[in-house]
Amino acid sequence: MLTTIQNALKTKEIRMKLLYVLVGMVIVRIGCNIPLPGVNSSVIQELFNKNQSLGFLDVMTGGSFSRMSIFALNITPYITASIILQLLTIAIPRLEEMQKDGEDGRKKINEYTRYLSIVLAIIEGAAMIIGFRNQNLFKDNGYTSMIVAVAALTAGAAFMMWLGEQITEKGVGNGISIILLINIVARIPSDLSNLYNTYISGAGNITNAIVAAIIIVGIIVAMFAFIVFLQDGERRIPVQYAKKIQGKKVTGGQSTHIPLKVNTAGVIPVIFASSMMSLPVVIASFAGITPKSGEGATLIQKFLKVCNQSDWCDISSFGEFKYTLGLLIYIVLVIFFAYFYTSVTFNPLEISNNMKKQGGFIPGIRPGKPTTEYLTTVLNSIIFIGAIGMVIVCVFPIFFSGAFGADVSFSGTSLIIVVGVVIETLKQIESLVLVRHYKGFLGN
């Protein structure tokens, strides 16, 4: 890996691409610290202190949500629009045809995604501003300040979308993923500082501090190693192509494989599950309703307590631990969405038909329906393994946060995104280096 980066830095073309990515990251972090005009920042900070469920949105936006900056929506409208368009390709035949039309179809779908992103940004921005306005977010409660704020949020989301596409085109890696990466990484230093102050600096004696440091570092390293293993793991299905005689030439006969990734759906199931669990809490926070238990708590407040991630795994008392029921619902949702999203993006029947048309077959499996059934069986097993792996990664931070009060913003979702983006970006840098070397070899 270090050799690849060194070789990349020696090449001017790749250096300029990396510099473009770096400048884009700097712009993102500057924008995340520019507040909306007329916003009372102390109100939003107090709201976040009362309702820690908003932390998931804050991590995805790099802290700009809690600061209520012009990038408070960040790229969430674009991600939501992309997922919606991807799911609609099943229900709308026209979109499915576009998806199969190659480059032209992809450009058309990207255009629809941009339009839908702007619409979602306006809706999300208006809902956020109206909701927080009831919490005295603005110094001036007139409609002018609200309209300006919604326009600024929409413009910020549109700019982030444009910047992500520019990084993809002129830089290295996927621009949207890189923006997500820098947002998450920006919060990690403060989280590590909180862990240090709580468990190492406040340990009481040097022995406890050393033990705490070893445990914290060990857990973080183990989680990163497990995620790398999960992201790179794949099941290779061998495929043999029959020999064909064309005139006097014999073609085909080669062996290849179909790579089925263990984590086929990536981080999407975790995002779906986290969003569904946090959505009721976020909507209720706009109305000033917070999760609450005990005497005087309404049924809605108790329900919000179940949905509130910060209340899970609280072992201080049985009365509070019962709200960990929300964690079980969360695990079921992760597994469900893993199967659902994979069924949307991976079609065993289509792969089977394409193999049959090209004269390919899986050794020991007849072409046609048996191949489809075999691929479906293998895929279902792999999806379950990948979903369980994601559950393990996501539950670890939740457990330590609830049981030991480890106040950190990065979650399993964040760690999966960070590792996945870094791996994919390094692979693209490596491919650019290889292409450059091949060009030099051919030029000689």
Image (cartoon, helix red, strand yellow):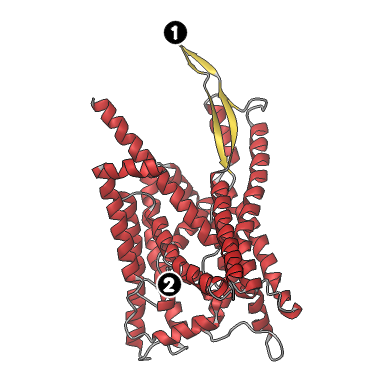
In the rendered view, tell whether residue 283 sits above or below residue 427. below
Q: Amino acid at mark 1?
A: Lys
The answer to whether marks 1 and 2 mark residues whose Cβ atoms lie closer than 8 Å is no
Instruction: Please report the residue visible at 44 percent of the width from the left and 10 percent of the height from the top.
Output: 247
User: Is 265 placed left or right of 34 in the picture?
Assistant: right
In the rendered view, tell whether residue 295 sits above or below residue 352. below
Disc with the residue nearer the chain's start (1 vs 2): 2
State the image quarter where residue 353 is shown.
top right
Q: Can residue 218 be seen here?
A: yes
> Secondary structure beneath disc 2?
loop
Extreme right residue here?
318
Residue 97 in percent (x, y) is at 46, 45
Q: Amino acid at mark 2?
A: Gly
Q: Quadrant of the C terminus?
A: top left
Mark 1 crowdedness (10 Å alpha carbons): few <14, some 14-19, many ≥20: few
Instruction: Please report the residue visible at 55 percent of the width from the left and 71 percent of the height from the top.
Output: 200
Where residue 63 is drawn, which disc sits there? 2
Where residue 248 is drawn, which disc sits there? 1
> Secondary structure beneath disc 1?
loop
Q: Considering depth in this image, is 289 or 392 the residue closer to the camera?
A: 392
